[in-house]
Image (cartoon, coloured by chain):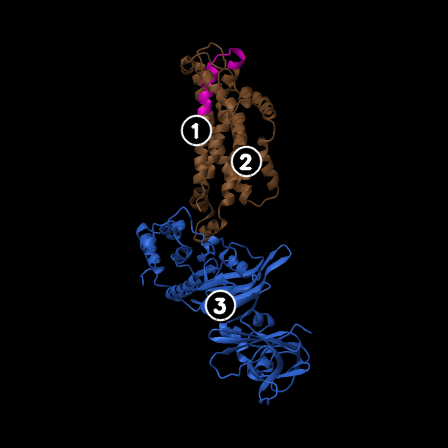
Chain colours: A blue, B brown
Amino acid sequence: MSSHLAGRTPTSDRPALVLRGLDKHFGDVAAVNGVDLDVRQGEFITLLGPSGSGKTTTLRMIAGFTVQTAGTIEIDGNDVSRIPPHKRDVGMVFQNYALFPHMTSGENIAFPLQMRKLPKAEIKRRVDDALRLVKLDAYASRYPRQMSGGQQQRIALARAVVFEPALLLMDEPLGALDKKLREALQLEIMHISRQLGATVIYVTHDQEEALVMSDRIAIFHDGKIEQLGSGEDLYERPVSLFVADFIGESNILHGRFEASSGGGWVNGDPWRWRVSEAAGSRAGLGNGAPAALVVRPERLRIIPRTGDVPTGVNTIDATVTDVLYLGSTRKFELTLPDGRAAGVRQQLGRDDADWHPADEVRLAWDVDAGVLVAGKGI
Amino acid sequence: MTDSFRRWNRILLVAFGVLTIVFLIGPSLVIVPMGFSSAKILSFPPPGLSLQWYEKMVTSPSWTAGFINSFMVAVLTAIVASILGTLAALGLARGRFPGRSIANAVILSPLVVPVVVIAIGMFSLYVRWKITGSVVGLVVAHTTLAVPFVVISVSASLRTMDRNLEMAAANLGASPVRTFRHITLPLIMPGVFAGALFAFLSSWDEVVVAIFLTTTKFRTLPTVMWEQVRQVIDPTVAAVATVLLVVTTVVLMLALVVRRQAPVR
């Protein structure tokens, strides 16, 4: 689109960001507890987790606003652990935009360039390019208060990329916007960051946003990265009960692991479910360990209690409690024999039998559809 | 029922407001007609009207010198106090150091310590240092008294300012000094300016400390008035007081206007 913001050509295979053993303690409380992360050039990484999981603290340490208790931060091969924020060459977009209210949007975008003492003509050219990039060319002389939230956030984005930082940090940038605008801006941020070849570290607690935007997602839990992987990795192959529960909807069946050749079993007395070989080896549980079998709602089928059970299928009895019509899908809420709730999602138009509340049914799923994770103990 | 209740409420509110204004401002306003009096001594109500006391005010050297001295001291006080007060407010708001609350209490203490105590303390020091009756001496003393006004006003501005803006500035490559110069200072400027105006006023009509620290060679307007009232009960004092009142009111209005324009975000 423009000559100056044409983007960074990945200069080497050197990682854009490396975190090693990053700790942050506030008094006795460990907000971040041993975070390791390697981010490739041009990668879009999302730090996802509930509030208080340490994702924002991690981001603030990368920006230099918070000094880590232990560990190192490398940006583009340079150790910046002890470098103050204004010398880190990192752009940041804040949730509340943080535009300077006494400057026009053009002056806001020019600010980082002025701080770098670029020539006036160069600054003007780059500001114009940046405004064009976020499609707000006509708004250079508007003050932030004269613009909508979405426009302000686009100016903030332009300001954060105009000096071509090594890293672009975003702290829940869309949190203050309504759903429709959020979805439009998600796509816009993705396109712009791709166009610039920017390496992005994005913090959010919205899993849908994370799944849509990211190359990889780091799930934060209790100050640690619980799992790092693509959205598909996290959804199809969660490594823990927390991740399984946090990402998407899941049905979780508790029991004890029984090792055997070719996978094993989860024994949730009186039920016993087969575990596939792949799932068994991934979880690496010992014989008799508390285990949980995770099955996504769209992987479950409802069958009559009386019929034959096909081979390669696990089952459990259930009672239908609710049937929800959700447009393209239908959702069944059920109760398991132990009183826990279960959910089944069906594409509409599929030739499934119709079930009604209070129907006594059986849930079935392919052995391959179950993911084994360590349980909480019974 | 609610309607009549509301009407009574309104009447009471207006009555209370009027009464407050009469008690607060009435005594000050009584002085105004006395300055235009034709009588030879301070009296109310004035028997007739005349501008002779205003004439005397602008021609008498002790009054004009008092005006000039007071104005000079007040302006210098406002400048010095707003610089020191702004820096103090920044340190108190942003700094994390042991004894911060003690520092805060000490800086604001001139507001609660009786002025006469401060005046006597300063007088005994100034006598030893031989700086009674000097401009610098009085400016230093008035600055001490004025700094709390600036600190309070600037602190309020700092509290309403979004800290993220300073972080954003640092993130965009601004050193702490440049962040202050380009972001923080412009945003708290209304608070600094309002503080400076209050500092000006606090010095402009300060009388207790000035009585102790001025000499016959160097007097401020309030001390000249004080002396005049004790010696000759001459309506010139009323004329001067009226001028004093006008200046104060104008500055106060200015401060209010600045405050109103303050919310930038």
Q: Is residue A317 left or right of residue B183?
A: right
Residue A208 tag number:
3
User: What is the chief secondary structure element of the magenta stretch?
Assistant: helix
Residue B249, above or below A257:
above
**x%, y% of residue A80?**
49, 58
Few, some or many C-alpha atoms within 10 Å of disc 1 (few <14, some 14-19, many ≥20)?
few
Residue B52, picture quadrant: top left
Q: Mark 1 = which residue?
A: B250
Q: What stretch is highlighted in magenta?
A: B228-246
Q: Are marks 2 and 3 on the same chain?
A: no
Q: In this view, does B230 lie above or below A158?
A: above
- Which residue position is annotated with label 2? B8
Marks 1 and 3 on same chain: no
Q: Which residue lies furthest to the top in this view?
A: B40
CA gap between label 2 and label 3 equals 58 Å
Q: What residue type is labelled 3?
A: Glu
Residue kind at label 2, given as amino acid type? Trp
* Nearest to viewer (mark 2 / mark 3): 2
| B234 in the magenta segment | yes
